[in-house]
Amino acid sequence: MSLTYHLQVVNLLAALLLLISFAMLSQRRIVGLVTLFAWQGAALSLSTAIVAWSTGQHHLYYSAALTLILKVIAMPWFFYRLVRKLDVDRDVEPMINIPTTMLIGIALVIFAFNLAMPISQMAGTVTRSTLGIALASVLLAFLMMITRSKAIPQVIGFLAMENGLFFAATSATYGMPLVVEMGVALDVLVGVFVLGIFFFQIRETFDSLDLKHMEKLKER
Amino acid sequence: MEIYWLLGIPLAGGLFLTLWGNRRNAPEINAAFSLATLIAAAVLTARIVTDGPMVVGRDWFFIDSFNVFLVALTAFVAFTTALFSRPYMRIEKEHGRLTDNRLRLYHASYQIFIGAMLLALTTNNMGILWVSMEAATLATVLLVSLYRTPASLEAAWKYFILCGVGIAQALFGTILLYFAAEKVLGAGGTALLWTHLNGVKTQLEPTVLQLAFVFLLVGYGTKVGLAPLHNWLPDAHAEGPTPVSAVLSGLLLNVALYAVMRSKVLVDGALGTDMAGNLMMGFGLLSVVVAAFLIKRQTDVKRMFAYSSIEHMGLITFAFGMGGAVASFAGLLHMTMHSLTKSAIFFAVGHATQKAGTQLMEGIRGLIKTNPTIGWGLMLGTVAILGVPPFGVFASEFLIITTAMHEHPWATPFLLTALGVAFAAIFGKVQPMVFGDTELPRLPHQPALAPVFIHLGLVLMLGLFIPPYLATWYRQAAALLGG
């Protein structure tokens, strides 16, 4: 009985995750994007913790804690600081207008659910129905990366993709082995750190974080 | 035991060089650490050759003929590149393109990069394989942008984002693999261990593995530089410092392909069909053709050879995709030849561009007059990579193409056309660079090009005669790939 109750909460959080992914697609301001990213991390962390509690998979607690520390506290804080320091918080117009992006997003969600259907039927986990949502949020994050031309939104899209992947891991398999999750988290952390350095280099050279300046290298 | 040395030395080197900074002998220390790594790799190789495959460190590491051969190759090219970078980076600094701090970053990241690749090669855990591939990317992002020019920053950004997205696909593939494995092996740490997976590969759920392989191939394939996912590669190679181009092209691409091959063995076992091989053949063939035609349009010499790397990686992927004893043997041989030859070419190109002060091919003329050593190095390297006998590349390409004629005749016209186009394009561009007219005076000093001739000597030797024990070794490795 209690299992179905937990399941409902996890499903609710999964829906929230998907909703946040859509909100990110339509968010114009960078600060707003960072806040949404933090909320997405919170939903992920909470759902991981609930799965850990209801199934007795203790290593998932570490995973949830890791998400909470990295993606809800450390990274958003870092991005807020970066945005303030680099003074880049303005409205940004995506390359494709927002209603069109949303429509493409809906098509992606349908595609993701179809792709995940045969696999979720095989999964023995209580949370299997959320695999489609996980895949959908990966694809939506990918779409966001494509439609944004600024550096920070692209990176947030990348991290949101990582969120979706972690959610997929939890919902299909109760999480990867702990050492792998730790490794992935370490990579993400180092990656964000490297990017921090990188942003300053880009800014110093181009006087802006707009990637439109970075379209020199292509085949002519 | 050797394995801990092999992985520990580059890591220690990275930490040490971070602390040491760019004092006077940092380049020598870098080379010394690389030499120590090479010795550890040689000891490990000798051990495997006598004792056969082994699993060490509570199943954490797995070494067989296939990966020990790549370990040896990686350590060797890493060492010669460290030797090459010593004078090269000194001159770059004299030209004012680099500062002490950036050289510190360079040396430290170089060691970490080598360490990450060796970890990727030796680990038994498919998850750790992913983690170390990503670590190898991160270690090189700041190296690609080392010169801080607008173009290099753009190249590094592209490298980071495209490889990051690519590798995220590979993570999803790994999750799916774990998902299938967990049903058979049970949850927990052992379900991602390759040796365990290999033992139960026929019981893994085929539909899941099929999907997993698509994601793994696209993910790691981005790093191999397979078309149409290759966009980052020419930029990163052209804009980064030349030693970095040499290790990216000669080593990183191989390691990424290694990851694909490890997955393919599992998927083949689970599916019992040629699905994985066919996908690899398709991507491989497309890369060969696309790269060959893009080579023709290049004006930057490093960019041109970067496309040539895509072409050769495509050829290797195609060979592995065909499978079978001969094709896998040829693929492995071609991997070796390409690594050695391409890094040698980058060494020679590095010196040539440094002297000419430009990477544009029209600015580099008459190398044979200004400096015969560089001129001959570049010319012989080019001839070798284009597959002219008696160099080893000829042997491996010949084997690949004859196998293709037997088993997949439809592919041969594409392969032959592409190789022909690449030959004409590259030779036509390198010839005036080496033999053209120039007003520049002869260089007063001799460049340090020993690594170029060591590499080319090895390629020549392997083209004329493959020692029996080496041939046995390749055959064993090919058998592991399902040959």
Image (cartoon, rainbow, N blue to C red):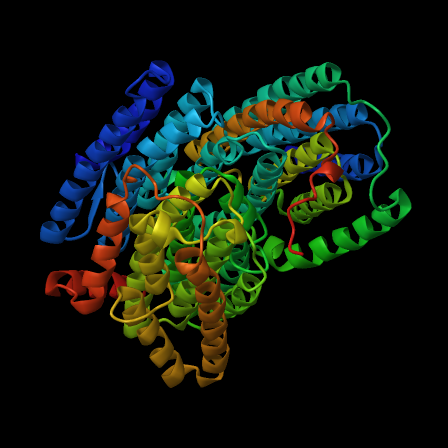
Image quarter hosting the C terminus of chain B: bottom left
Q: Is residue B118 above or below residue B330?
A: above
Q: How many marks?
A: 0
In which quarter of the view is residue A115 placed?
bottom right
Left or right: residue B163 versus residue B42 is right
Q: Is residue B268 above or below residue B118?
A: below
In which quarter of the view is residue B261 placed?
bottom left
Percent coordinates x, y for residue B123 in the rendering: 32, 42
Q: Is residue B30 visible?
A: yes
Q: Nearer the viewer, residue B299 or A174?
A: B299
Q: Nearer the viewer, residue B85 or A75?
A: B85
Q: Is residue B239 above or below residue B417?
A: above
Residue at position x 27%, y 36% from top? B83
Q: Residue furthest left?
A: B50
Percent coordinates x, y for residue A146 in the rendering: 73, 45
Percent coordinates x, y for residue B276 in the rendering: 47, 66
Left or right: residue B37 versus residue B234 is left
Image quarter hosting the N terminus of chain B: top left
Q: Nearer the viewer, residue B440 or B279?
A: B440
Residue at position x 73%, y 57% from top? A111
Percent coordinates x, y for residue B126 in the rendering: 40, 45
In which quarter of the view is residue B481 placed?
bottom left
Q: Is residue B204 visible?
A: no
Left or right: residue A50 versus residue B73 is right
